[in-house]
Amino acid sequence: MSKYRFQILIILAVTVLCSAVVAQQSATTLSFKVLYAPPGSGIGGSPGLLFEGKPGLFYGYGGFMPVGSGSNIFSIDALGNYKTTYQFPANDLVEAVIGAENGLLYGYGNAQQTGGAGPNYFSMKLDGTALTLYPTGSFGVAGSFAIQSPNGYLYDVMNCPNCELVRIDLQGHITSLFQFSSVGLVTYGGSTIVQGKTGNFYGIVVLPNNGSKLAWIFHLTSAGVFTKIATFDLNLTGGGTTTPLMYASDGNLYGGLAKGGSHRRGSIYRVTPQGQMTTIIDFPVSGIAAPAFLLEADDGNIYGSTNEIPSFLFRFNPASPVLETLYQLQYTDGICGCGFVQGSDGKFYGDAPVGGANGQGTLFTFDVGLAPPKPSLSVVSPTSGAPGKQVLLWGNNLLGTTFVSFNGTPATTFAVTSLQSVFADVPLGATTGPITITTPNGSYATGGNFTVP
């Protein structure tokens, strides 16, 4: 069980669940629905963050009660149809799963199926077949959630307390890129490493003993040049971690502090690439408090959840940040901090690690009336090629792609492998010009040209 979830259980043990605090009113109409509440003893307890692997079909991981049983990998659709796709043996615990550009699910845990040699990375098909274990060996325990990059690699922090940024290829081979101990620092808690538009990495580090009560947000180039760009007081985290750093489409980083702000009830900060750190949201003196998770949605707003009881969902516009309370969760809805993703239908799908009808958390959806998100592309690799050349189209909201063309010539061979990736072969007759990709939600054409010799 992660430290984060253990803290939530402690809160549950000492907090009265029925709260008299009233959420701030919001003009936004929000519908909230629990899709699945894991049983009190059985499959899928304390579910983790979802990803959409096929249109309307989400994948994630859960625990298995009683304690000591193995985790499971599951799928759930927009109607709440839940299916266990793979069940790990006793004591095999999964910590995170993501979808990669080769169409496989990758995860991390302490799988013992290799004769007690865990921890492991693993991969499998979305239907739960073809499990492959990749022992991490001397790199030890992962310290954050892996991220997928358009260069075909996963990136993660491993081997803490020394802490190394590592690159993992899709065959499980691990390469160390940077040792944080070389600058006398370690990564903070389970804080997530994020990658910016230019391929640089950002995260949060502290001194090994935290004696200074300071944390630093860092910038790390792909060549290993490390720079501290901003700092904050660890006391403002309330003894826990910050929200995972989020790299937004405006090129800035966003995060939350559980005890930040003038009332010490929470704050949201923005950090520019140059390191200018600004508090943009100050949580009020009562009601909503302690931000735990942030996500930028297709409408450009940032949505989030809080980590106190009662838990709330909120949003703000980063261009003119004003906190808007969207929904107060009841115990049967689940207790946050909740993570969530925006689905291809425009709705949000997420997990509450505890609470719910059976006390084992929930999987839920909420809808604020956003239109289904249109596709977009940020990377085309390579940028030139003759007919027959395979090209990676990397972006967002690419599930369900129905049409790809090279300067108007349809690609007869293409494969949709994840939410962010489509592989297309340059068609016969193609000429130099933009690439257009179409999903049921709309079309997108690249601003630059793909060159056909």
Image (tube, rainbow, N blue to C red):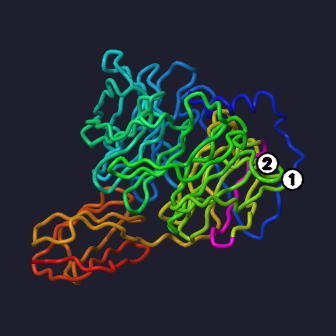
Residue 295 image offset from top left, x and y in percent: 57, 57
Name the foreground residue: 124 vs 207: 207
Disc assigned to residue 420: none
Which callout, 2 or 1, points at the residue further toward the start of the chain?
2
Residue 98 image offset from top left, x and y in percent: 41, 46
Element type where label 1 sits in the image:
loop
Q: Give the residue displayed 65% in from the left and 55% down from the top.
A: 304
From what the image shows, is residue 347 above or below residue 20? below
Element type where label 2 sits in the image:
loop
Q: Give the residue displayed 50% in from the left and 60% down from the top.
A: 343
Give the labeled residue for mark 1: 285
Looking at the rendered structure, the number of numbered marks drawn on it comes to 2
Look at the numbered discs 2 and 1 and tell me whether their residues touch, using CB distance below 8 Å: yes
Residue 299 image offset from top left, x and y in percent: 57, 71
Q: Give the residue displayed 68% in from the left and 62% down from the top.
A: 315
Give the labeled residue for mark 2: 265
| Magenta region, residue range | 309-320
- What whole-number distance in Å separates the C-alpha atoms at marks 2 and 1? 7 Å
Q: Quadrant of residue 133?
A: top left
